[in-house]
Amino acid sequence: MRALTIAPMHADSLEISEVPEPTPGHDELLVDGLALGVCGTDREIARGEYGWAPPHRDRLILGHESLGRVSHAPPNSNFESGDLVVGVVRRPDPQPCGPCAHGEFDMCRNGRYTERGIKEIDGYGSRQWCVETDYAVRLDPRLEPVGMLMEPTTVVAKAWEQVHRIGERAWFEPKRVLVTGAGPIGLLAAMLAVQQGLETHVLDRHTDGPKPGIVEALGASYHHDDIAEVAGKLQPDVVIEATGAGPVVFGAIANTASYGIVCLTGVSPAGRTLRIDAGDVNREMVLENDAVVGSVNANLRHYHQAAAALAKADLDWLSSLITRRVPLERAPEAFDTEPDDVKVVIDLATGS
């Protein structure tokens, strides 16, 4: 069976390999892989920056943004052949911490979780894969062209859940949202904002290409000016930050409305310095009851939230996020970024 594999921590080791066909366990689905989304995490693993192979193995099957069709389901599993499914990425550690033991494995406190296609478990980048029935989520059949957007949608579903939990420490009725970054995470965060009936603004540095049109088609407003200027005028109640760029992060924190909430989903690169007035940031956050929270990964609850959000989204708009598709045999091409890329997808079901 053909699969996309990597030798973690070794740059330029990405290749299409022949691997054994999977054999499902008694409580596992056998799934025909349809498509795989590629994100920044995958590209970092491909550059040799991190990643962990399964125990006693040198190579890892890459891929965590899954989409497949059930080929075989165990009896009484609530799944059946033909179901469109995605697989959850993270698994709780075998000796779980408190959050993992209570199903909140996205909030693992001891770091001994594992992740499909990232940390110690093979991913979904193969012609077929298996997944435990407890870690599979069914999708609306009409989402087959775009279902690989499920995993990034879970990330922003969790982010929005965190925002509402923090906001509800007191009376909370946000009106205006600013999303920083118009990559897949940012655009999907904006989609959830629009679905909530919020006035939605998206900030990105691109002035041409597909991103401005995608934002406008969503019914949101697109901006490309400096963060301080844009956020200073808007005074958003909520910021979903999806760039990880230091100046954007602190520009957003400094320019929310009172009782503003900034949710950080972008991971900043290490080794870059930024001069800020820490005292001024602290003073403003305290006096305005502001909050900043980091959010990463998702648990099973967020997968179901994401499935519901995608099911009621406009299919043409979701399709516009996928700007390039490549077959599995040419999968390394998906790791070379092009100027107009938003989401690049690897087609697992077709040949070269």
Image (tube, rainbow, N blue to C red):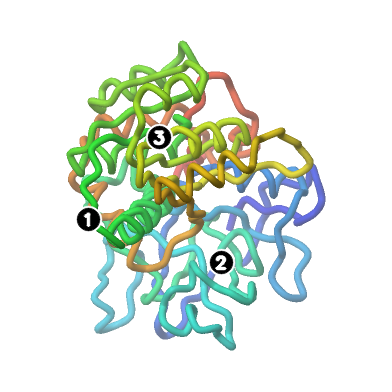
Instruction: Choose mark 2 or mark 3, whichever is in front.
Output: 3
Q: Residue at x 44, y 47 (%)?
A: 287
In the rendered view of the protein, which quadrant contains the N terminus? Answer: bottom right
Calculate the distance from the C-alpha at mark 2 to the C-alpha at mark 3: 42 Å
Based on the displayed image, in which of its 4 quarters is residue 59 positioned?
bottom right
- Nearer the observer, disc 3 or disc 1? 1
Q: In terms of depth relative to the viewer, which is nearer, 97 or 19?
A: 97
Neighbour tally class for label 2: few under 14, some 14-19, many 20 plus, Cα within 10 Å: some
Gap in Å between the C-alphas at discs 2 and 1?
54 Å
Image quadrant where residue 194 sits: top left
> Is residue 280 at all visible to an observer of this figure?
yes
Q: CA distance from mark 3 to mark 1?
A: 22 Å
Q: Which residue is mark 2?
A: 21
Q: Amino acid at mark 2?
A: Glu
Rendered location of residue 303, percent (x, y): 34, 61
Number of callouts: 3
For the residue marked with disc 1, what is the amino acid? Trp
Residue under numbered circle 3:
179
Front residue of 237 and 225: 237
**Disc number placed over residue 171 in the picture, else none:** 1
Specify whether 28 is left or right of 215. Answer: right
Which element is circle 2 on?
A: loop
